[in-house]
Amino acid sequence: MSEITEDKTTGKALNRRVHMANERTFLAWIRTSIGIMAFGFVVEKFALFMKQMSFVLEKSTIGEVSPPSHGYSAILGIFLVGLGALMGLLAFIRYKKVEKQINDDTWQPSSRLDALLTISVLVVGIFLVVYLIYSI
């Protein structure tokens, strides 16, 4: 009889560990999405800073002021903030899905969110490389 009690206790502890691992994974995704949003915010604000600096420099050197050129930094910044928000939402959906699968003992791996993040970071990286090459 004591063996059955030990199995139940061990099973509950194992189930708690699996749920805590799921929560740690969720929190890692949330940190990643916050990082992406923060990077997007910095990129967008840097674009605003550059527009203001070009306005000030043109005003001090030339009598007529031409409007600052529209760069891709603002678009990229807004895209990154949106991507980070989307990643946070998808992380929550994944967390709840895995939580239900753990409770039902039907867990199956899914790499859609991993693939989406990898592809997004790759696309942003390629865009930044091209942007930096052409801005030289």
Image (tube, helix red, strand yellow):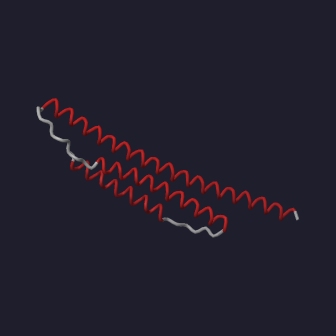
Q: Where in the figure is residue 44, as x and y percent of width and height?
A: 33, 44
Q: Going by the picture, which residue comes out furthest to the top?
A: 60
Tell me: 86 left or right of 64. right
Which residue is drawn at the image coordinates 58% and 61% (left, top)?
96
Tell me: 11 left or right of 4. left
* Quadrant occupied by the C terminus: top left
Q: Where in the figure is residue 64, as x and y percent of width and height?
A: 12, 35
Q: Where in the figure is residue 27, as x and y percent of width and height?
A: 55, 51
Note whether 39 is above or below 126 in the view shown.
Answer: above
Q: Where in the figure is residue 92, as x and y percent of width and height?
A: 54, 57
Note whether 77 is above or below 104 in the view shown.
Answer: above
* Picture quadrant of residue 60: top left
Which residue is drawn at the image coordinates 12% and 32% (left, top)?
62
Which residue is drawn at the image coordinates 40% and 53% (left, top)?
82
Q: How many marks?
A: 0
* Quadrant occupied by the N terminus: bottom right
Tell me: 125 left or right of 130. right
Q: Going by the picture, which residue comes out furthest to the left?
A: 63
78 vs 113, nearest the viewer:
78
Note whether 35 is above or below 63 in the view shown.
Answer: below
86 vs 136, nearest the viewer:
86
Tell me: 105 left or right of 120. right
